[in-house]
Image: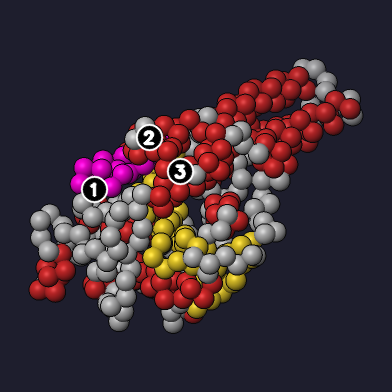
Amino acid sequence: MPIGYLVTVAFVAWLTFFAAVAPRRPRPLGRMSFWFGLAVNEQPFLAGWWLLAATVFTFAEGDIAPPGGWVVVALAGLTAVGLAVVAVRGARATRPVRDALTDALGAGWRDRVGAPALRRLRRHRPILRILLAPFAVRRSDVERIADLRYGDAGTRNLLDVYRHRSRPTGAPILIHLHRGGFFSGRKNREARPLIYRLAGQGWLCVSANYRLRPQVGFPEHLIDAKKVIAWVRAHAHEYGGDPDTIVVAGSSAGAHLAAMSALTPNDPVFQPGFADADTSVTAAVCLYGYYGPLTADPRLPSAPEAYAGPGAPPFLVAHGDRDGMVPVEGVREFVARLRGVSANPVVYVELPGAQHAFDLFHSLRFDAVVDGVEAFTAWVLATRATPRGAAPARVAGTDQTSRRKSS
């Protein structure tokens, strides 16, 4: 029995099981699916190379002896089939992205989007980069200006600015907020393929930290997100950005903050000390987000759907149907609620086979999502109709701002 080969194959098989089968119930098993299956789910090719190299080396060394050796080879073959299933799921992400855009924006949406964005949406993925260099997310034509201060909370109130080295002016702006369940996380980790893509095409991109639990709770996270928007609106011109065109985005907990920010523009309750700042945004992009409540205080709702109204900006929501951390059912409910009241489109992309945190590096799946976000934002810029500075949304027919002040 080739022990070294057995250990390698068993380990890859273990990871592949949680990527391919991805059980979501009970909840502890769903968390195992996330932690053990994440890397393989987005990069089955690297696991395949590892499995192939171990197999070739073992055969070359003559260590495959019956019957135990062939049992391990059979397990390797079964694992390879599982990896192929995972890869096919990832490759199928382009169609759901296209269909979601057409479903929400209408059959003629392509007429409003520039040809480069459409070409990237239609093209095959950059397979060599995904196969050989998935973690190489930086671009030589983009510069990062790190650790700019937007508040007085130390490292938790720092942000990074990304811009093209040609330093364009009048650039649309993307703000990204990181994941971490409000307990952890940092800027410069998630969604970097998206940030570098847009920055390479002339956008001004911002990635920000915010205060975390247990030092603070809701609404301090949201207050920080709004401080970022206010800072960007005040300083964007210094870096070539257009302060009238801001798209707020986020991953997981950051998606919750992005949604809350987009749905509560200029709400003084969430802007203590900077109530006069304009914190409205042009659109929102939410990746594998949690949209439930953060507290049980009925006087200050902490779920985005409580603030959904006709003035909501356009949304793009992307989530995996096998997410073991944030079940997809709750996301569908949020999207249905938002679609039911918003006067603007809500694009909902449900990604087959996708797990939580699918935006850490280049993959067949996330590159398709990036293409979709690029097309969505191009459509938003071409059809902008949502006025900035709209009044805060009402909750269940009650003026929420007045209600909180009286409570």
Badge 1 element: loop
Count of marks overlaid on the render? 3
- Residue 16 in view (yes/no): no
Tell me how the rendering is colored: secondary structure
Q: Which residue is disc 3 drawn over?
A: 113
Residue 342's mark? 1
Q: Which residues are magenta?
A: 331-350
Residue closer to the observer: 109 or 126: 109
Q: What's the CA distance linking mark 1 and mark 3? A: 22 Å
Q: Is residue 333 inside the magenta stretch?
A: yes
Instruction: Say which residue appears at 23% left-offset and 47% top-offset.
Output: 343
Amino acid of disc 3:
Val
Residue 213, how many percent across, how many down? 40, 68
Q: How many neighbours does mark 3 have within 10 angstroms: few (below 14), some (14-19), or many (20 or more)?
A: many
Question: In which image quadrant can residue 391 be found?
Answer: bottom left
Q: What's the CA distance linking mark 1 and mark 2? A: 20 Å
Q: How many neighbours does mark 1 have within 10 angstroms: few (below 14), some (14-19), or many (20 or more)?
A: some
Instruction: Say which residue appears at 70% left-offset and 33% top-offset.
Output: 48
The quarter in which the C terminus is drawn is bottom left
Q: Is 113 situated above or below 188? A: above
> Residue lying furthest top in this view?
67
The quarter in which the N terminus is drawn is top right
Mark closer to the chain start, 1 or 2: 2
Q: What's the CA distance linking mark 2 and mark 3? A: 10 Å
Q: Is residue 406 inside the magenta stretch?
A: no
Residue 118, how many percent across, how many down? 52, 39
Badge 3 element: loop
Q: Which residue is disc 2 drawn over?
A: 108
> Residue lying furthest right in this view?
61
